[in-house]
Image (spheres, rainbow, N blue to C red):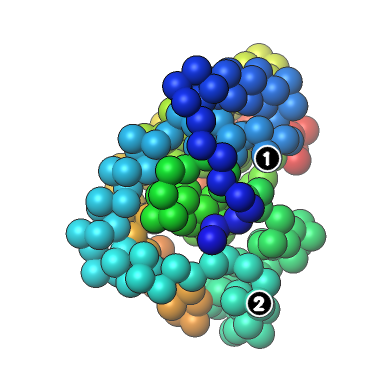
């Protein structure tokens, strides 16, 4: 079982949960539970397509068969890996922010165990993607990553998060996002391999730069010098 007990919704109930979650998430973007509910209630067709792609990929198939979970008990060894490795970079990303891989909300609104796992996997690899793309966890960084996630999975929630996030920027921040982060995120999302078909845990001990090249990852470029002050105000 992935997460807590799943809830089956009819069409009207699903629409009501989606609307309520969307409004709540816009009012408070820190509500991970509402963002998760929005992703599940609006994303079933997208998750079904991701599932099929994973079934067509050898590494994606291995993920589906073994169903690895990104939890402390399974990824704790990353903290002991050499500094140049992907695993060590992930550990540094999590540790510097006092994040725990155990804090993800459970999947509640997927119809099958298989789809529930795909939704949970997408949720749990989010911090791997932060690490690989070198993105901060402020509103600017999260919005940029949602652009990449939308290109990778076509989840409506990702598109709505970009709209909602950019609406909260002031004029200077909005200019920085659409002139700097947004064009890069479009390129990065298109150049990357299918990121849901990677068994990340098997690559923890590999060099970070090597896996970035292997998966077509374009790290976020430095902010232009004229934008540095604006960027610092967001961190």
Rendering coords of residue 232 (x, y %): 74, 38
Judged from this view, the residue extending furthest toward the left is 56
Give the spatial CA distance, label 1 vs label 2: 22 Å
Q: Residue at x 71, y 56 (%)?
A: 103
Residue tagged 1: 32
Rendering coords of residue 79 (x, y %): 67, 78
Closer to the camera, 47 or 153?
A: 47
Q: Secondary structure at mark 2?
A: helix
Is residue 167 visible in the rendered image? The answer is: yes
Q: Residue at x 50, y 17 (%)?
A: 12
Q: Residue at x 57, y 18 (%)?
A: 16
Rendering coords of residue 28 (x, y %): 74, 27
Please give the label number shown on residue 73: 2
Quarter of the image holding residue 197?
bottom left
Please state, as top left, top right, bottom left or bottom right, where the C terminus lies in the image.
top right
Rendering coords of residue 119 (x, y %): 47, 48
């Amino acid at each position: 079982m992935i997460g807590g007990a799943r809830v089956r919704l009819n069409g009207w109930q699903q629409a009501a949960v989606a609307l309520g979650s969307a409004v709540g998430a816009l009012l408070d973007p820190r509500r991970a539970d509402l963002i998760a509910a929005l992703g599940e209630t609006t994303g079933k067709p997208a998750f079904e397509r991701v599932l099929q792609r994973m079934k067509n990929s050898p590494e994606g198939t291995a993920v589906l068969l073994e169903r690895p979970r990104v939890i402390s008990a399974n990824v704790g060894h990353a903290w002991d890996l050499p500094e140049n490795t992907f695993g060590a970079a992930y550990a540094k990303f999590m540790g510097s922010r006092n994040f725990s891989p155990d804090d993800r909300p459970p999947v509640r609104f997927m119809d099958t165990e298989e789809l529930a796992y795909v939704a949970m996997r997408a949720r749990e690899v989010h911090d791997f993607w932060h690490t690989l793309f070198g993105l901060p966890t402020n509103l600017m960084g999260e919005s940029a990553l949602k652009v990449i996630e939308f290109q990778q999975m076509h989840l409506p929630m990702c598109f709505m998060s970009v709209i909602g996030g950019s609406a909260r920027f002031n004029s200077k921040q909005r200019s920085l996002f659409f002139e700097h982060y947004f064009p890069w995120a479009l390129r990065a999302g298109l150049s990357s391999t299918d990121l849901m078909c990677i068994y990340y845990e098997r690559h923890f001990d590999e060099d970070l730069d090597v896996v970035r090249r292997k998966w077509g990852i374009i790290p976020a470029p430095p902010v232009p010098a004229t934008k540095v002050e604006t960027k610092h105000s967001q961190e």
